[in-house]
Image (tube, rainbow, N blue to C red):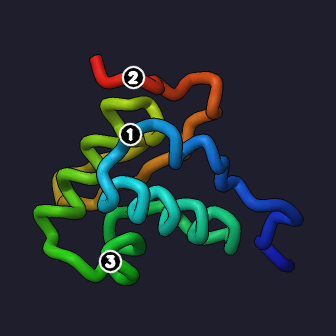
Amino acid sequence: MDNKIPWSVMNRRIFSMGLSTEAISAYIICCNLADNGKTISKANIASFWNSTSQDLVNSLEELIRRNVLRKVISDMEGREIYAIEKVQDWTFREQ
């Protein structure tokens, strides 16, 4: 069974939110994972990430603060799973 979806989850409005370059990069990686039927996990994101692990943590936190991502699961072993929120739920201005 093919888990790929026939359209991309990426919304170009991400570029007008004033996010850091790293947060936008993390979002694009998350969209790529979703488009290919993969789990949006910190481990899967990290496998594509080309900056520091602290930059990844900061980027994910920025996306969560702006309601672009939501942490779905976090366990005692450090596994974190995320979901991409609907664009209408995004916070377009830093609060």
- Of callouts 3 and 2, which one flags the residue occurring earlier in the amino acid sequence? 3
* Residue under pointer 1: 18
* Residue under pointer 3: 49
Taking the spot 88% from the left edge, 65% from the top edge, the residue there is 6
Q: Amino acid at mark 3?
A: Trp
Spatial CA span between label 1 and label 2: 8 Å
Taking the spot 42% from the left edge, 56% from the top edge, the residue there is 24
- 51 displayed left or right of 60: left
- 12 displayed left or right of 17: right
Taking the spot 19% from the left edge, 51% from the top edge, the residue there is 58
- Of callouts 3 and 1, which one flags the residue occurring earlier in the amino acid sequence? 1
Image: 29 above or below 68: below
Q: Amino acid at mark 2?
A: Arg
Q: Position of residue 77 (x, y in %)?
A: 18, 61
Q: Which mark is residue 93?
A: 2
Q: Position of residue 8 (x, y in %)?
A: 75, 60
Q: Residues within 10 Å of mark 1 (few under 14, many from 20)?
A: few
Disc 1 and disc 2 in contact, CB within 8 angstroms = yes
Question: Which marked residue is nearer to the observer: mark 3 or mark 2?
Answer: 2
Disc 3 and disc 2 in contact, CB within 8 angstroms = no
Pick the front one: 61 or 91:
91
Helix, strand or loop for disc 3: loop
Taking the spot 38% from the left edge, 45% from the top edge, the residue there is 73
Image: 92 above or below 52: above
